[in-house]
Image: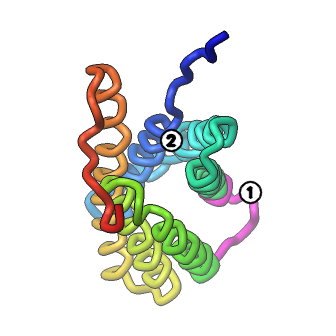
Amino acid sequence: MTEQKRANPAPLGLSGFALTTLVLSTYNAGLLTSGQNAVLGLAAFYGGLAQLLAGILEYRAGNTFGYVAFFTYGAFWEWFFLTSLGIFGGVTATGIGYVLVAFGIFTLVMWFGTFKSNLGLFITFLLLWITFFLLGAGAMMGNNTLFHAGGYIGILTAIAAWYTGLAIVVAESLGAKPPLGKAPMS
């Protein structure tokens, strides 16, 4: 008996992350100033639920890195959604800043895990930890310049993640190898 081929959950997780990050980052960069609640549904379902599902599927596939990354960032988006709704009470900008810095530390460590994967993931995680640190520092210090810089780097992060995920989808549909490049230590 042969095992049935399963879909790769990474493009779903990367796409959910990318789209939600792109929308939120346009607000964080100050490019859009009204309608911020547009990101809430994305955070709950595409950034949150879809990434949680991708994480579970990565677990089933035996991919520890994908499991930890997608499940953690899916949980981040669910936290963002519930915090934005005020479910946890009055969370201060300093408190949010600390959470963002903590996610920056987590992402920095996860970035080390991309050194032998592909250039797409390497760049995505590099930009993401920078994004988290800039947003966190900006929130804690009340510094809009740092916060807006985090938004701009977040936009670049979203583009890198989307490229990585969609390159896998398109390459697979064409029967080709994804054009993701080699990470620095591969």
Residue interval drawn in magenta: 80-93
Is 172 displayed left or right of 60 in the figure? left
Amino acid carrying label 2: it is Gly
The answer to which quarter of the image holds residue 33 is: bottom left
Query: According to the image, label 1 marks what residue?
Result: 87
Foreground: 66 or 162? 66
Query: According to the image, label 2 marks what residue?
Result: 13
162 drawn magenta = no
Q: Position of residue 58 (x, y in %)?
A: 61, 40
Q: Residues within 10 Å of mark 1 (few under 14, many from 20)?
A: few
* SS for dot 2: helix
**Can the viewer see residue 29?**
no
* Residue at point 35%, 29% (across, down): 169
Quarter containing the N terminus: top right
Is 9 displayed left or right of 163 in the figure? right
**Can the viewer see residue 101?**
yes
Foreground: 139 or 77? 77
In this view, the residue farthest toward the right is: 88
